[in-house]
Amino acid sequence: MTNYDKQNRQIERLKRERDDVKRERDEAVVEYKRLYSILDGIMHETRRLNSIISSACESISASIDAKNYSEASRHAENAFYSSGLISSRLTFADFEINPASISRQQKHSSGVYKKFDKARMILARSAKKRSVQITIQGHSQNKIDVLPAFEIVPFVLLDNAVKYSPDGQGVNICVADNPLPGIWIQVIITSIGPLVPTEELPKLVYRGYRGSCASKSNIPGEGIGLYLADALIRLSNGSIELSSSQNTQYSINDIAYSNFIVTINFKK
């Protein structure tokens, strides 16, 4: 009887060890997938920004050859700003990999209007190729405290708007100080894009999630932009609200398109 009990205890111990190993393996698989997703996102965004920098450098060379130095200066400025966005993206990746790293980052006071205007200028060239015009309205002198990685927020939001806009459409940015009680700065981005059913809207800020209509289109996407923006806006004492008109304006390749609005509110 004693030997039987001893064997049972050994069997139970081995089962527990087996379960522990299986749990550790499952946790390792989940962590691997998480890190791979972060790396994939970094590579996607870096390639995108590198393409903008390369295009700007090519334009600099052409402008210098044509002795159009003011144009060359503008393209050089865009290349400089774009290179800074790569640094911002890597800073956010550090936060994703190790959330505790946020405590090592120093916030600085920044004007929101200027950041969106800067992103607008960076994307102007790629938008022009598809006759998409990016306009900015309003005025803002209020500032907010942001992390260094916040620099990428205006870029990914406007890049998304331009990418999903049909040719010949427009992207409008409206910035206002103190528009409502309790709101320090408000930014509203309006564009045309694939219709997003109401039940899908909250999911758009999930990493890797794309709306059903956007997924059916031939427009490439990783489902990273709104996730990045939402996380960094929340870290800046702000919130993001997404809305999509449920009335189809027109269809392209059997995909419904409608008004899409991104509203960002910052508290003081």
Image: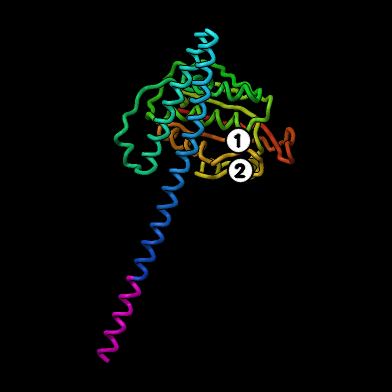
Of residue 32 and residue 173, the one placed in the foreground of this image is: 32
Residue holding disc 2 = 211
The amino acid sitting under disc 2 is Gly
Q: Position of residue 116 (x, y in %)?
A: 50, 22
The residue located at (52%, 7%) in the rendering is 67
Q: Which residue is mark 1?
A: 243
Q: Predominant secondary structure in magenta?
A: helix
Please state the extent of the stretch shown in magenta in the rendering: 1-17
Are the residues at dot 1 and dot 2 in contact (C-beta closer than 8 Å)? no
Q: Amino acid at mark 1?
A: Ser
SS category of the residue bearing label 1: strand
Q: Quadrant of residue 162?
A: top right
User: Is 159 left, or right, of 23 in this rendering?
Assistant: right
| Residue at (35% x, 42% y) in the render | 99
Q: Is residue 174 visible?
A: yes
Q: Is residue 229 visible?
A: no
Measured Cα–Cα span from mark 1 to mark 2:
12 Å
Locate residue 183, reporting x and y percent: 47, 26
- Asked if 260 appears above or below 111 in the picture, the reply is below
Q: Quadrant of the C terminus?
A: top left
